[in-house]
Each structure stands twice: as C-alpha cells, then as structure tokens.
C-alpha cells in the first residue's frame, strides 16, 4: 500500500509517498539521495546504516519508513552546517578516526547519540554503547580518542570550527 | 630527529587528503552511482555443491513486470560478441555464469535483470533450474586422492601475470598448483637429528567482510565502449579481463574505481564485472549489481589450510631439517589460489636459517566457495604452523622460545629456504621490540588442571612475507605552472591511506606542500597500469613509480632554473615551492617563476612518467631455489599476555603488541592504523571468526552468526610499533605495511595459552571449548579428573635412542 | 534484499489490533520494535500480507511501580528504557542489567519488552530473570484478557502460549521479598557482541540466619525454551549454602536441559558451562542478597 508521510529530515520537512514495505535506508538513499546512509549487513548488526530517529540510533535497514510519519531523522548530511563541522565530525577528522570511510557516517551518528544520551559515559559505557558499530578496518583506538575529544569539545563552548 | 631535518613531508603525520570527505559522508562509493535508465541485476545461485545444469526454465521469471532479461550460461555461450566466456587470473576456469556445471553451493547459474531490485528479486524466486547432482569433494586432502571427484576436467592457464607465467595446462587432478622447495638433504638431516617434532595445524576458511559489499555498475557508452564503475582492487586486470571476454581492444574498456569500502583481498580480479558487463552488453542499458551480505559469503573466502610440519633438532638445539606439507583448499575456482600457494608455499619454513628444507604446498580444487587473497596472502596460515612448531620444539628442549627464535632467525645476507640471500630483514629487531614491550621473561609453562581459576602467560611469534615479484606499477605525474601537482595512479584507495601516502611522496620529490597534490583515483582511460592494490606492495611500487615520474619533472625544473640562476643543477635545492642555490637561499626562483622562464604561458604543464617494474629470478620448478625470489621482504613480530579461565576455557588478551618492519614510515599514523587494524582483524580470526562449512554449505552466512571484532573485543592494551630497517631501493627506504600486523598473531596467542596453562591448540579458531577440552584431555592423560572425548596425541615424537624430552 | 509487498495496518487500540489479526489470520503478523521480524522479512523466510502495527496503540509505553503489585511494564517499553530507567534500577536492578545485554544499542532503542517475549527465541536474555522473579504477562485479545506466569509462556522454539490474536499488553514483575539478590550471567563464548552461548539467572531470597528461603534458577539457550530449574528449593530451602549444596543444585542441571551443537559450543560444552554458570549465578545472587535484619 502507498501512503504519504511527513518526515523532518536534517531539519527540513519532507513529504514523501512510500510503499508500506519500503525500508528507511532505501527511502533515504533512493528518494532523498542521502548516500551517507550505507547498508553493510542488512541485519542491523554492523551499524553502517545508522541514522538518528527522534534522536535514537536506528538501524535504517530494519526500519519501515511507513511507520515513521512525523519522525525527525538525522543523517550525516545534516550534521555539518556549510563549512562548519559538528564537533563529533571535527573530532573524527582530527583524530583521523576513519580508514575506508564506509562505517564512518553511522559511527559519527552513533557517537553523537551517545554524547547526547549519556554525556557522562565512562569508558566502559562508551564501549558498550558503541560496540554495535563495526569498523572492519578496526580503527577502534582512533575512534575512542575521537569520542573523548568530541566529549571535551561539546563540554566547552564552541570556538569557530570550520571545515577548511 | 634526523628524518625531520632531511624531509619536509615524508615521515610526517600529515592529515589524510580524504578526511573531510569521509567525516561528512560525501565520498562516492560505487553503489552510490546511478545512471539514467539503470537496471538492477541479481543472481540465481546453485543449492548443490556439484551438479550438472540440465535446464534453466526462465518463463515464469520473465513474466514478472519490470523484468528485462533472464539469462543462463547457455545464453552466454550463444551470445554473438562474447568471444571467451571464461575468466580467471591464473586459470580461465570460471564462466561469466556457470556454463556447464555448478561447482559450489552459491555458484551463480543464472541472472535476472530488471527495472528495479524488487522486480529482480521477485523474479529470482521464479527461475527454475534443473540439476543433475554429481559427487562432490570438500576436504583438500581428500581431493588429492586418486578417484576423488574432479572439480575441473581441464585447466587452461590465463597468462595474465608474469609471476604466474609458469603454470601449466593440466587435467585429471584437483591439484592445480604445486609449490616445491628443496634445499640441502632433509632425509639425511632427519636421520641425524636427536629429536623430531611433527604435527598438523589447521586454519579454517574465513570472510573478508568489507562493510561495502561487492558492487559493479556497467554501461555501454555512446561509442560502444564498455565502462565499469566497480569496487575492485585490480582495475588494470579488470580491463584486460573484460576486453578478453568481448575480444575488443583495451581502449574499448574503461574501468573506474571510486573509493572502496575496503577490500582486504576480497575485491580482486574478476568478480561481478564479467556478468555486469555482459548484462549491459545485451540490454544496452546501465546495469548495477550489488551483493547482499549473505551472498558475500559465496563469492570469495580465505583459504582453509591443513599444514603438516616436521622439525629435526639436535640436542644442542640446532634445527637441522624442516619438512612442510600444506594442503590449500582453493574451492571451486582457482582464482588467485596458485599465487597464494606459491608465495606462502616458499616461505613455509619461516624467517629462519635452516640448512635443509623440503616444502610441498598443494593448491587444491574442492566444491567449496572459492578462496583467494586475504590480508596476509596465505602467510598467516603457514606462520600459524611454523611458529606453533618452533615453540613446541623450544619447550621440549628446555630452551626459551624467544632465544630459540633469535638464534635461528635470518640476518642480513643469510640464505632463505629458497637460497635467496636476505636483504633488509627486520625479524630480530621486531622480535626484540615486542618482547621488550610485553615485559617478556622466559616462560615456565605449568600443567594446570581444568577448574583452577585464571592463569596468565606471555609469548611471542614472528613471521615474514615476500612481496609479489615480478610486478609493475606505472605513474604519470603532472605539474602545473602554479606548482600544483596531479598524480595519475591506478592504486586503489581502500582505506589504507594510499592517496595521502602517495601524495606525500610526490610532494617530497617536488618540494611542494601536500595540499597542492591531487591524486587521481583509478580510471583506466587516464591512469596507467598497476598490477594490483594488494599484498603490501603499493607504497614501494607505486611510490617508486611516482617518485620516478616526479623526478623527471624535478630534473626539468632544475635545468630550467639553472639557466636562469646561472648555476649548476646539482647545486640547486627544490624545497618549499622554491628552487635555490644550496647555501645561498636568496638566489632562487619560485616554481611559477621557473615555469614562466621555461614555457612563458599561463597554465602550462610538465609531465613525468615512470614504469616501475620489479624482476625476480623465477623459482626453480623442482627445487624452489632462486637468487632473487622477491623484491623485498617484510617481517612482523607480535607479543601477547593472555589470561585463561580454566573453568570455561575462555582466553582474554590483556595486552598485545604488534611490530612491523616498515622500512621507513611515510606517514606514521597510517603505519599505526595498519598494524593495529591488521592485529585486531587477526585476533578476531584467532578466537571467533570462521566460516562454518558443512558439506559445502556455509551455515553462518550472515553477520548475525559470523562475528567481527567490535570495540569490546579489542585488548585493553594494544600497542603498534614500527621498526625501520630501510630498504635500499624503497621510496625513501619504505617497504609495505598493510599485512605485517597479521602475520604472527595467531601463534602468538596459542603460544601464550601454552605458557599460561600448558595446552597446545593446533586448530583455529581457538574457542573456549577447544581450550577446555585440551585441559581435560591433559588432565586425563595424567590420571586426574574425568575427561571429555579424546583430542590429539602429544606432539613430540622421539627418534630411536634419544633421551626423554619433557612435554 | 527488499521486502515483499505488504499492507501496514495501524490500529489504535489493543481490541482493534486483535480484531485485525483475526480478520487476516494466517496472513498477518504483529509488529512492535520489529528488530527480529524485519530480518525475517528481508530474508523472505516469511511473507505475511499484513503487518499490524502495535506502536500506534497509545498508552502501552508506561513504566511504573505500584506498592504491593510491583513493577508494571507496558508492552511497548523499549529495552533502552528498561536499561536506563531509575525506577527499574531501583526496584529490579537485574532487569536493567539484563536488558542492557541484549543485541546492540540500535536494537535496544527499538525492541520492546512485549515483542521480545512474543518472539519466543530460546536465546533471548530477558526471559531468564523475568521468570526467576516470577513475572507475569497480561495478555489481551478481542473480547478478553488473562494473566500468565512467564514460566508458562514459552512452549517451544518461537512458540509461545499466545493464542491467535492475543497480544502481550503488560509485564508485571512482583516486588521480590526483601533481601532478595538476583543476577543474570550471560556467557558469550565467541565475540563480545554475540548471542549467548548460554545465560543463567538466579534469584535468591535469604531466610533467617543466612539460610535460603527461596532460590529460583533459570537457564536460556540450552533448550527450546527457557528452563526454570526444578527441584532447587527442595534442596536448599532452610539450608545454608555450601559448596556441596551448590554442587547438588548443579547436579540437577544435566537432566533438565537439552542443548544442541552449534558454533557457540557443542552440547557437551554447553552442559559443562550450564553447570558452571549455575554455580556462579547462585554465588553471585547470594553475594547480592541481604539477610533480613533482626
């Protein structure tokens, strides 16, 4: 069945016509051309397709878009404002917490959710929260450094970070 | 530091050129590319491990709305324009689809192409294939026996690569390649050995599991050229392979490779490209094909290996003979198996100076999913065996295993098993580094019974790999009048940071900041030939090619500047975008000024080109002897401290150290990432990653069941160390680093477990159950405890007349 | 893989949801968090024509504590809420700990308490402590409701006591008697993100003088459904726990479980581990239990 839903995607309201059986990952990629949403396993395990739905980290490959009428969706494309990077992106860039880059958008969104939901998470809680996002290049040490750095950036008032 | 003074870019932690793109999710991967009118293809796969294809009934599938075509092997054979439907890097043994029979479960036997993925997937369920099942063989040792079912009746070499030029036509056997090494006289040496140690060590098949699956987009352009956007590590091979299928000149095929969501050896040679090109060819529409995760388990794997080792040792602790016999399960198609067996085969005795060596390594067809390159190219499987064996022998002789290794390890100029004198070998340096970092002391393994709580142990191991030789990297470097630089190279950026490292090399040679260098991603219309992006070869080979090409520009710039400055070119320095007289920095010109003087127009260019080709002395067919087996060796060593829970058999790695001899760090951060990443990947393979295969059926073909290491699986302490034994011919002394961290991880863990609780695990992966069973088994052997079913007999076999050896 | 064509029905009451199910019986499935169901749909193991959305039903995501009743958990409460809720942490900390161990953070944000139970997978973690704590499910269907102890809820692999059209509406966890110590030990033999090789929950209520008043032990992943170990209280009630007595409880395990060989261990190994972890769980529960004062 087709239905029309309204989503707020990266801050902008979007009215979409979707089939009931369509997956959020496909709708974001194919309808909205948000290619930072990358499917890796199709079973919700790897975390590459993580997006935030009403702030919650979500496996877009296991989510029916038709059930999300009225939801707020964040993807990697919505994190930076022009040349201004989000502090988590900045931290990933500075700590070079990426290699092939395929897991990176999902990872950055998971870290954003972590720092919003558990701003005071200790190392064990941080690892527990993020363990569901795989980095097959295994840049985990860099990623943990980036999380720590992002935490500090978010705790401090921002001083004009840019992408240049 | 000296390096800092000497170089301005090399050895620096310069930021990655792909960083901003990657943290904003902007890089384009192959699966992101859409073309107008693009079709989607899916594959119909065989449920049988070995079966003749009797009939493919397409009618019901063809009637699904949106379906454009359904094709079988027969259709391919009947397509005018397809001049050779067989592909493969060593043997042309694999059809674009299965053409006569299916040779493994998951072998593609038909393809459906449709307007949407949904339609293609729906139609796939409706393709009816009639099979005539054939006897199948799964075990590589069984497959070598007379009378075993033949996977391929005849073998046709493809002659795609110089290092595999020696493979012969064959038939009537499942052994598609046999690597021999004969050095000295092993029989005589074993006869005079005081002790002989013999054992079998096994490694299971495994998945590369790059998070980006295999994906290809094929398109026939308005000039009738075949264009492929594809996730491959070998664009140059894909071009020649595709041209071969259709019998067209190389310039009628264009292969473009965006960033890869990693490869680890899985995205080499012909994968989805032949079928995608074929479907585009017959439909005249762009066709995308992308595998699902479960399909990934049916395209390529890491080789399963059964390795028998025999070591002859004197009572003084001298190793006088080593004999290795290894069976490599290469699956249904040879793919690059013969090269894996060749390269791992001749290093099967390890980085040691053994006077008498006999190696037989067999690459064996079976009815399993094909096996190919996997980070380490087969070497981790042989290191698993020889480093477990070295420890066993050392303990039996009462010698510290580290000491034992250092005593036998190769030094500069020593002869390898192939008779090749060693050049730039960092084994001992790496071993010493990791031993120091782990706080190594000679172990005293204790016989701990099961159920005695937690015990700890430390151990080391090392390994060596030889880079693929001969091979070729070509590069074109263009400098623009403003000093900016474009590098044309077919090295694939798959996460390793080649884009940045190669830019560093160009920047250093041309005296410009790295931000002024742009590295073009592979596009065979633009970037010249490169053998493959694999095997830790790119920094050295493409680095040398780029350096050579840049040097041509540099020479032209210096010559032009010399005229203006009235100086000898040899007295000029090119640095920081200026050319000046050494010792008189004020006498100089900027790069744009030199261009203006030489060419006098805006936007002019200088171009340099270099083909870097390495040469080997091919290994003798019967003896494996060679004056130069490889262009360079790269070695690694690892050390671990583990804690074994003797109640559960579970092993925790408390601390892990990995060292690699990188020659020289071009970018220290990349080296750390490569070494640590390789170690973590291989720790996964050590403890819990394996493809569970029953009668050719993969039973854990999803990431719900097949496990990858997560953040929580990383040892609490993990250290990566770069050891720098510069190579005389490497760019700035650099060697390779992508695989070094994988080599010795697995035996390091097994050795540490032995040192903790006195049991030896010989079959990977090291699951808690195997450790617990071994503990029970040992306890039973010593009359204690009730024990589970039998495992294996002890490892040391004494020679007649020899004195008793402790365990 | 894409999903086959289907219709999503979005009722607003339990009654309506149940009626829709019965209307399309045999061709419909309820969906709550959907984390398990979507995998099956994507793999095309299962192709229902209708999905009946329970998330559109209002008022099923409450979580409250009622004195004398216990913790009342609406079926749509997510694992994440269970993990983080101060109320759960205060009254039944073992539940917060257990829900924290399920899947990954995305699964926990989507998966619901009711959906987890209705799924009936023998490897799931939450049923073990819930059964150990004598939790009950309130089941609702068109024209009726009933309560069922969770120990009677699971029948076989993916098979529960739910009748056609019946929906888990609420889980009630009675307040454990004062001093009760409860734990759930999840043993993963492979990676840290894997399914359990097995899991053991134990809830121990101390009696006077350090004796045991009540002990319930539940194992998961070692049979086609969670196993509440029988015969435990007959051994331990009124006794002080000794190594020997724990050994006797461990000796009950073998006969009551039926593990199968898989990549996480052979049946032999799972039996060994089941005994071991039963012992570990009892000791851990005892360490948490507080003897009544005075």
Image: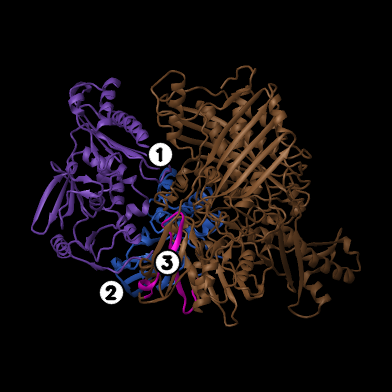
How far is mark 3 from mark 1, CA to CA? 45 Å
CB atoms of marks 2 and 1 within 8 Å? no
Q: Which chain letter goes with mark 1? A: C
How far is mark 2 from mark 1, CA to CA? 45 Å
> How far across and how far down the image is residue B390, in percent?
62, 31
* Nearer to the camera, B336 or C84: B336
* Nearer to the camera, B573 or A107: A107
Q: Residue at x 15, y 53 (%)?
A: C163
Color of chain C here? purple
Residue B546 is one of the magenta-drawn residues? no
Q: Which chain letter goes with mark 3? A: B
Q: Is residue C30 left or right of residue C41?
A: left
> How far across and how far down the image is residue B211, in percent?
48, 57
Q: Is residue B710 visible?
A: no
Q: Which residue is mark 3?
A: B55
Q: Is residue B671 left or right of residue B613?
A: left
- The residues colored magenta run B33-62
Element on which disc 3 rests: strand
Give me the chain that's brown. Answer: B
Circle 2 or circle 1, nearest the eye: 1
Give me the chain that's blue. Answer: A
Element on which disc 2 rests: strand
Q: Is residue B398 above or below residue A74?
A: above
Residue B35 is one of the magenta-drawn residues? yes
> How far across and how far down the image is residue B452, in percent?
42, 24
Circle 3 or circle 2, nearest the eye: 3
Query: Quarter-wise, where is residue B569 in the image?
Result: bottom right
Q: Residue at x 27, y 35 (%)?
A: C257
Let me know if marks 3 and 2 both belong to one chain.
no
Q: Which residue is mark 2?
A: A3
Q: Which residue is mark 1?
A: C189
């Amino acid at each position: 069945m087709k239905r029309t839903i309204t989503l707020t995607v990266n801050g902008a309201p979007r009215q979409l016509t979707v089939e009931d059986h369509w997956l959020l990952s496909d709708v974001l990629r194919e309808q909205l051309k948000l290619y930072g949403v990358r499917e890796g396993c199709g079973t919700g395990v790897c975390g590459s397709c993580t997006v935030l739905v009403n702030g919650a980290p979500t496996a877009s490959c296991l989510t029916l878009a038709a059930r999300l009428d009225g939801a707020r969706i964040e993807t990697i494309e919505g994190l930076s404002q022009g040349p201004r990077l989000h502090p988590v992106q900045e931290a990933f860039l500075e700590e070079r917490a990426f290699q092939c880059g395929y897991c990176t958008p999902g990872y950055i969104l998971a870290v954003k959710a972590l720092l919003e939901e558990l701003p005071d998470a200790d190392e064990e809680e941080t690892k527990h929260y993020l363990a569901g996002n795989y980095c097959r290049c295994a840049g985990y040490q860099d990623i943990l450094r980036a999380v720590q750095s992002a935490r500090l950036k978010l705790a401090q008032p921002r001083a004009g970070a840019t992408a240049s | 530091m000296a390096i800092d003074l000497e170089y301005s870019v090399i050895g620096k932690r310069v930021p990655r050129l792909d960083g901003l793109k990657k943290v904003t999710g902007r890089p384009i991967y192959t699966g992101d590319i859409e073309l107008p009118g693009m079709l989607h293809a899916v594959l119909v796969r065989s449920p049988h491990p070995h079966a003749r294809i009797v009939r493919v009934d397409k009618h019901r599938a063809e009637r699904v709305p949106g379906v454009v075509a359904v094709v079988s092997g027969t259709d391919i054979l009947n397509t005018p324009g397809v001049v050779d439907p067989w592909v493969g890097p060593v043997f042309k043994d694999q059809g674009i689809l299965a053409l006569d029979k299916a040779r493994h479960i998951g072998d593609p036997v038909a393809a459906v192409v449709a307007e949407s993925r949904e339609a293609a997937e729906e139609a796939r369920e409706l393709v009816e294939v009639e099979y005539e099942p054939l006897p199948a063989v799964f075990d590589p040792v069984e497959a070598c026996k007379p009378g075993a079912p033949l996977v391929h009746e005849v073998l046709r070499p493809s002659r795609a690569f110089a290092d595999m030029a020696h493979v012969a036509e064959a038939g009537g056997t499942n052994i598609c390649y046999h690597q021999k090494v004969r050095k000295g006289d092993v029989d005589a040496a074993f006869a005079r050995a005081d002790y002989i140690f013999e054992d079998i060590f096994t490694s299971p098949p495994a998945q590369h599991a790059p998070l980006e699956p295999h994906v290809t987009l094929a398109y026939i352009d308005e000039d009738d050229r075949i264009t492929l956007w594809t996730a491959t590590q070998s664009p140059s091979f894909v071009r020649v392979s595709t041209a071969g299928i259709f019998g067209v000149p190389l310039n009628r095929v264009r292969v473009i490779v965006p960033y890869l969501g990693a490869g680890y050896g899985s995205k080499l040679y012909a994968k989805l490209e032949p079928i995608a090109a074929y479907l585009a060819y017959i439909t005249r529409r762009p066709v995308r094909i992308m595998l699902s995760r479960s399909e990934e388990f049916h395209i390529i794997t890491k080789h399963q290996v059964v390795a028998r080792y025999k070591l002859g040792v004197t009572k003084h602790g001298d190793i006088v003979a080593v004999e290795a016999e290894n069976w490599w399960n290469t699956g249904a198609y040879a793919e690059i198996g013969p090269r894996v067996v060749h390269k791992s085969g001749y290093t099967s005795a390890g980085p040691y100076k053994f006077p008498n060596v006999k190696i037989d390594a067999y690459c064996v067809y079976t009815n399993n999913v094909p096996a190919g390159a996997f980070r380490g190219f087969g070497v981790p499987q042989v290191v698993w065996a020889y480093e477990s064996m070295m420890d066993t022998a050392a303990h039996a002789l009462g010698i510290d295993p580290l000491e034992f290794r250092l005593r036998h390890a190769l030094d500069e100029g020593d002869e390898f098993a192939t008779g090749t004198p060693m050049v730039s070998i960092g084994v001992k340096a790496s071993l010493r580094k990791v031993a120091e970092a782990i706080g190594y002391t000679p172990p005293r393994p204790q016989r701990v019974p099961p159920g005695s709580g937690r015990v700890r142990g430390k151990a080391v191991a090392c390994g060596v790999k030889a880079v693929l030789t001969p091979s070729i990297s070509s590069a074109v470097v263009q400098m623009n009048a403003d000093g900016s630089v474009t590098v044309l190279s077919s090295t694939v950026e798959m996460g390793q940071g080649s884009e940045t490292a190669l830019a560093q090399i160009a920047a250093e040679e041309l005296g410009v900041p790295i931000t002024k260098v742009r590295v073009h991603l592979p596009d065979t219309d633009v970037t010249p030939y490169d053998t493959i992006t694999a095997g830790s070869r790119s920094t050295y080979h493409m680095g040398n090619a780029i350096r050579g090409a840049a040097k041509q520009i540099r020479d032209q710039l210096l010559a032009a500047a010399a005229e203006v400055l009235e100086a000898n070119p040899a007295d000029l320095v090119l640095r920081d975008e200026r050319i000046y007289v050494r010792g008189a920095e004020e006498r100089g010109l900027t790069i744009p000024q030199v261009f203006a003087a030489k060419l006098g127009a805006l936007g002019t260019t200088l171009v340099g080109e270099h083909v870097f080709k390495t040469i080997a002395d091919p290994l003798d067919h019967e003896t494996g002897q060679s004056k130069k087996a490889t262009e360079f060796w790269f070695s690694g060593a690892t050390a671990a401290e583990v804690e074994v829970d003797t109640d559960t058999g579970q092993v925790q790695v408390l601390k892990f150290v990995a060292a690699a001899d990188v020659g020289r760090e071009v970018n220290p951060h990349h080296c750390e990432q490569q070494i640590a990443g390789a170690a973590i990947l291989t720790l996964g393979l050590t403890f819990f990653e394996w493809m569970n295969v029953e009668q050719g059926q993969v039973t854990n073909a999803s990431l719900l069941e097949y496990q990858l290491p997560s953040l929580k699986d990383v040892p609490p302490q993990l250290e990566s160390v770069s050891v720098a034994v510069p190579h005389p011919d490497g760019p700035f002394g650099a060697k390779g680093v992508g695989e070094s961290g994988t080599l010795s991880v697995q035996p390091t863990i097994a050795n540490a477990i032995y040192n903790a609780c006195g049991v030896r695990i010989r079959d990977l992966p090291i699951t808690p159950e195997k450790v617990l069973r071994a503990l029970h088994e040992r306890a039973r052997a010593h009359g204690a405890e009730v024990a589970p079913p039998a495992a294996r007999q002890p490892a040391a076999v004494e020679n007649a007349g020899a004195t008793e050896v402790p365990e | 893989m894409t999903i086959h064509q289907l219709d999503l029905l979005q009722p607003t009451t339990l009654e309506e949801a149940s009626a829709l199910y019965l209307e399309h019986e045999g061709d419909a499935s309820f969906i709550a968090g959907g984390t398990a169901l979507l995998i099956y749909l994507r793999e095309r193991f299962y192709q229902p024509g209708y999905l009946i959305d329970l998330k559109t039903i209002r008022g099923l995501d409450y979580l409250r504590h009622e004195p004398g009743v216990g913790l009342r958990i609406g079926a749509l409460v997510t694992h994440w809420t269970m993990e983080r809720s101060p109320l759960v942490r205060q009254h039944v900390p073992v539940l917060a700990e257990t829900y924290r161990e399920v899947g990954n953070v995305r699964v926990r944000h989507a998966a619901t308490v009711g959906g987890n139970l209705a799924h009936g997978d023998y490897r799931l973690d939450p049923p073990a402590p819930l059964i150990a704590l004598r939790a009950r499910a309130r089941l609702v269907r068109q024209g009726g409701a009933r309560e069922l102890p969770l120990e009677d809820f699971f029948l076989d692999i993916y098979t529960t006591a739910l009748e056609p059209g019946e929906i888990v509406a609420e889980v009630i966890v009675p307040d454990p008697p004062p001093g009760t110590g409860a734990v759930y030990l999840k043993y993963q033999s492979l990676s840290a993100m894997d399914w359990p090789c097995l899991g053991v929950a134990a809830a121990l209520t101390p009696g006077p003088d350090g004796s045991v008043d009540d002990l319930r032990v539940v194992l998961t992943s070692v049979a086609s459904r969670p196993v509440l170990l029988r015969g435990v209280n007959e051994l331990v009630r009124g006794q002080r726990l000794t190594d020997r007595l724990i050994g006797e409880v461990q000796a009950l395990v073998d006969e009551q479980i039926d593990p199968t060989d898989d990549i996480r261990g052979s049946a032999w190994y799972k039996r060994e581990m089941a005994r071991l972890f039963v012992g570990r769980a009892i000791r851990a529960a005892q360490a948490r239990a507080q003897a009544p004062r005075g």
